[in-house]
Image (cartoon, helix red, strand yellow):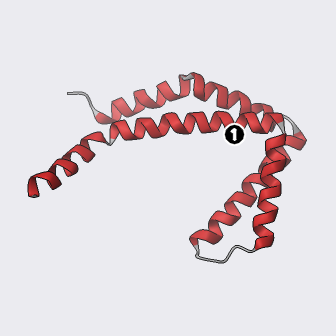
Amino acid sequence: MPNMYDSAYDLEKAIRESDEFQDLKNAYDAVMNDESARQMFNNFRDTQMALQEKQMQGQEISEEEVEKARQVVELVQQHQDISKLMETEQRLNVAINDISRIITKPLEELYGNGEETNE
């Protein structure tokens, strides 16, 4: 019987060695090694996190903050390296979400079938 944790570490290794992760690492390094790109990217992330924090605390987000965030997003999307970083991050996130669905399938089947037998 394979150990779940051993399989998880194998999966971690597979992710690290995947093209998606290597592409993300290269894109991240390109942004971090460019001073203006790094500042722009950090500003983008800080803006995102500040808005998410406000949302989680149930605080109102002003029109001004929404507009500022939109401008920051537009700016980073126009920067080739940052845009590439965001695209590669999105590709890896899709893969990780797919993997998550695969590994939670036994629970879904168990609880899904449990509901059907109660009807």
Position of 115 compared to 2: left or right?
Answer: left
Total residue callouts: 1
Q: Quadrant of residue 57?
A: bottom right
Q: Nearer the viewer, residue 98 or 13?
A: 98
Q: Position of residue 115 (x, y in %)?
A: 16, 55
37 displayed left or right of 55: right
> Furthest-bottom residue in view?
59
Give the quadrant of residue 87.
top right
Q: Would you name the residue on which mark 1 appears?
A: 86
The N terminus sits in image quarter: top left
Relative to 12, does residue 19 appear above or below in the rendering? above
> Which kind of residue does numbered mark 1 sit on?
Met
Which residue is outermost to the right?
A: 36
The secondary element bearing badge 1 is classed as helix
Which residue is depicted at the point 74% across and 58% down? Answer: 46
The percent position of residue 66, horizontal first and vertical second, equals 75, 66
Q: Report crowding for label 1: few under 14, some 14 to 19, many 20 or more residues within 10 A (C-alpha).
A: some
List x then y, in percent, for residue 95. Answer: 50, 33
In the picture shown, does residue 3 fall above or below 37? above
